[in-house]
Image (cartoon, helix red, strand yellow):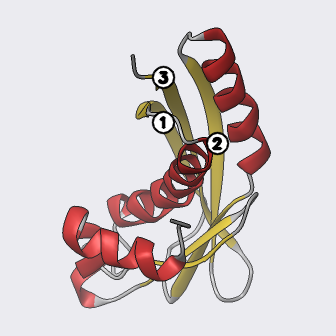
Amino acid sequence: MTITPKKLNTYTLFKLPAAYFTGVRTKMITDTTCVVTVKHRWINQNPFKSMFWAVQGMAAELTTGALVMSKIQESGKKVSMLVANNNASFTKKATGRITFTCKGGEKVNEALVKAITSGEGQTVWLNAKGVNEQGVQVSDFNFEWTLKVKS
């Protein structure tokens, strides 16, 4: 079963309802890239009338996590995945539609192959940048994913 944007959006409805109800939606996933958007609305705003940082974090994490899930599924192996660390920086108020993009598919491939061949847990840092409708970066997230083959 191939992971598609429609399947990921249905997944968020049932498994990540906070992301779904705040408007986080997957728009595209390929072998190397995942794109997720979220629109600033009343339900996801902070007191300063911009998007709450945690909503941006959910969208950013989904871009990276969807790539990891997709690669694990392609491998046919049972692999656990977990965020071990993350950091973020915010450079502008997030209003309008924010688009998060992760282009780390190759890095996930390398870490997954290493985990499968060595039998040892691996980590991979993935980046997701959030840009507004004018193409201006509003946030920058990094997630350290751990991958370990289940015995």
Do the numbered discs 3 and 2 sit on residues whose CB atoms are within 8 Å?
Answer: no
97 vs 31, left or right, is left
- Which percent across, then down, holds residue 54? 34, 58
Q: Is residue 36 something that shows in the picture?
A: yes
The amino acid sitting under disc 3 is: Val
Where residue 18 appears, as percent x and y from the top left, is 22, 68
Instruction: Report the disc number at residue 126.
Output: 2
Q: Label 1 neighbourhood size at 10 Å, few (<14), some (14-19), many (20+)?
A: some
Q: In this view, does 34 lie to the left or right of 14?
A: right
Residue at 25% in and 75% down: 13
Is tag 2's residue or tag 1's residue first in the polypeptide sequence? 1
Q: Distance between the residues labelled 2 and 1?
A: 9 Å
Residue highlighted by disc 3: 149
In front: mark 3 or mark 1?
3
Checking the image for residue 15, the label placed there is none
SS class, disc 2: strand
Name the mark nearer the viewer: 2 or 1. 2
In whole angstroms, how far apart are the C-alphas of marks 3 and 1?
A: 22 Å
Does residue 45 appear in the picture of this structure?
no
Image point 51% across, 38% down: which residue?
87
On the rendered structure, is 16 left or right of 146? left
